[in-house]
Amino acid sequence: MLTRHSFKSNAVKSNSIKSTSIKSTPAKSAGLLLAGLAAVGAFIASVMLGSTDIAWSSLWAALNHYDPSQVAHIILFTERLPRAVIAALVGASLAMAGVLMQTMTRNPLASPGILGLNAGAMFFVVVAVSLLPLHTPAHYVWAALLGAFVAAVLVVLLSRSRHGELSPLRVVLAGVAVTAMFVSFSQGLLVIDQQNFESVLYWLAGSVSGRELSLVVPLLPLFGGALLLSALLVRHANALLLGDEIVTGLGMQATTIKLLLGLVVIVLAGGAVALAGMIGFVGLIVPHMARGIFGIDHRWLLPASALLGACLLLLADVASRLLMPPQEIPVGVMTALIGTPFFIYLARRKMASQ
Amino acid sequence: MTQSSTLTYESGANNESNRLLHSLWLLSLLLAASAGLSLCLGSFPTQPLQVLSALTAPAHSDIAFIIWQLRLPRIVLAILVGAALAMSGAILQSIVRNPLASPDVVGITSGAALAAVLYLTLLSTSLSTLLSIHWLPAAAMLGALVSALLVASLAWKNGISPSRVVLVGIGLAAAMGAGTTLLIVISEDSAAMTAYVWLTGSLYAAQWGDVMGLMPWLLAATPVVLAFSRHADAMALGDQVAEGLGVPILRSRMILLGCSVALAGAAVAFAGGLSFVGLIAPHLAAKLVGRNLARLVPVSALVGALIVVNADLLGRVAFLPKDLPAGIFVAGIGAPFFVYLLHRSRGRV
């Protein structure tokens, strides 16, 4: 009963969103193009701006003839470029994970950060780094994926009430409980093993700086697989919004679809944490922004969220460099400060109807 | 009929007050035993008889300093902090009507922590001539108050709905946690580690001055809470019922909330962010004596004190020569307990 009721109110809400979003296909294509251009612009800004600004000419020269004797070229290739690539990847994957989670739970507050996936991944990485002799990037990735998986299973088990419905409050509380557990375990490790303070704090605060591009390599096939799978399942994701029966009508079990999409979410969220630690709220805000512009059709929503997520994290990272020089603010702190008002707004709106 | 029903009612009441008495005695005994054990154990080996003589005749003992100035204030502070947090949690759970509410979940603790870390950061700057470390508790309490007011006003929408309070509190806790991380990252390394250990919740280097600072808050808040506990119990039946019984709902709720904030803020000010005591202790106490607030508050206080004293003992002794923050042990047990509670409450929240 309750599921159906909340589904109805969701449908009403999505209709009201649809009326403000753009409808025609050419306009959506143009919108997607604009989002892509914005992401490219943010990428270039992230490469050029910082404590030493890099001029257009030296950017061009470095790309054509890399000269290791020039400081600007070294900064560009060892720091700025990896950082921008990681920020773009992390932003895009968190945003896509957020879209899929909000679709699967039909809960506007769902996101990898709030539901504890980030914390689970972070804890397993911290354990791998500080307790086990696992120090290569590939190890981080597998630890993070395992952690995201464990957290996801825990949250699903906890948020399911006896009758199977998922109330928004329960889902969020389950996420908070799981996050609290993993964060407090990590803090315990941190205080016991103070030598690893720096590296653990890095994962806790969330940052895209100081990472090498080699970290990205083991993740590329995983991200590629996740993208492919989500591309194959867009129509099923659309059907999930309408109810589990519709998915069955498309010739597949709703549970199978949810499991496959869950796998995509775990790979995206775990990979993002392996690269950058706990970065919250990107997966919450961006899907709502993208839905406001492009509507609820996943064929547009997923690519648009990826582009906007990349854009948001790149810009947040640039801001974190420029706001308080020479100090750098961890970008996870920036996104939390931007995202909280939005979370409270959603919580007020959602809980008002109950 | 009437007679028999009053009879059963009376015997029920007797039964309940018996349970209360038994629980109070049992918990007090356990607490005394834990405190005694904690007094005897430590990095400096001491015998129970030595400790006893140091307690009774400090002038003739070699270890009087260790017992009177190092261990005893720390144990007393642990008792007070545990009691304050547990009472704060019991009150909050009763007025928010949500078994998962606690000062940490709804953001009161993180507000206090943010204010305290901000104050610690200011202390290490040029402003240090104007400020003194003695005002740290006041800063933490102010932070707790501001965050409670923020949560209440942001959750306000034609009255306060309990679930909205919890959700808004979770959101605000995230923002204030981010602010705290920001401060830690931008301050110098040594200050950062101090702030971090403090945040985890530690009773390291507790002094009699701290005990004296925390005591008045407990003494002031407890009678108020007990006086208003009947209103809280009426409100637990629903706002309409309470109104029908003539309870001034808004005023009682605000006064009880104020007590809860003051207790949590004071505890955080002296012991840092000891999370989960305010969540677990009331639940364990409710298992013993039920949800009636006048009974729940004293029993919760004892349970909370018991938890913190033992966690601190574990932190001091288990990993010698390291002195670990008690908060690690409380959180390590408390967080899985939170998960368990959520599992138990299926179908109710």
Image (cartoon, coloured by chain):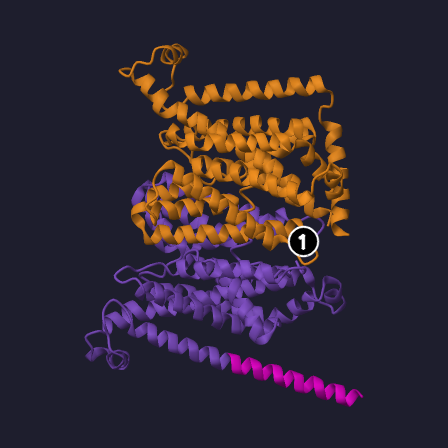
Chain colours: A orange, B purple
Of all residues, the one furthest to the front in this rendering is: A251
The reply to whether residue B158 is visible in this rendering is yes
Front position in the image: B241 or A194: A194
* Helix, strand or loop for disc 1: loop
Which residue is tagged 1? B160
Front position in the image: A327 or A8: A8
Chain letter of disc 1? Answer: B
Vertical order, A169 against A342 (above or below): below
Position of residue B330 measured from the top left corner of the image (x, y, whole percent): 43, 61
- Label 1: how many residues lie within 10 Å, few (<14), some (14-19) or many (20+)? some
Name the magenta segment's main secondary structure: helix
B195 on left or right of A250: left
**Residue drawn at (56%, 40%), measured in percent from left and top?**
A263
Vertical order, B204 against B55 (above or below): above
| Quadrant location of the N terminus of chain B in the rendered image | bottom right
* Residue B231 is covered by the magenta coloring: no
Amino acid under disc 1: Ile
A269 on left or right of B198: right
* Residue B18 is covered by the magenta coloring: yes
Vertical order, A78 against A157 (above or below): above
Position of residue B260 measured from the top left corner of the image (x, y, whole percent): 54, 61
Vertical order, B241 against A314 (above or below): below
Position of residue A139 measured from the top left corner of the image (x, y, whole percent): 39, 40
Per the rendered image, the range of residues in magenta is: B1-23
The reply to whether residue B143 is visible in this rendering is no
| Quadrant location of the C terminus of chain B in the rendered image | bottom right
Front position in the image: B131 or B30: B30
**Residue drawn at (19%, 75%), measured in percent from left and top?**
B62
A142 on left or right of B91: left
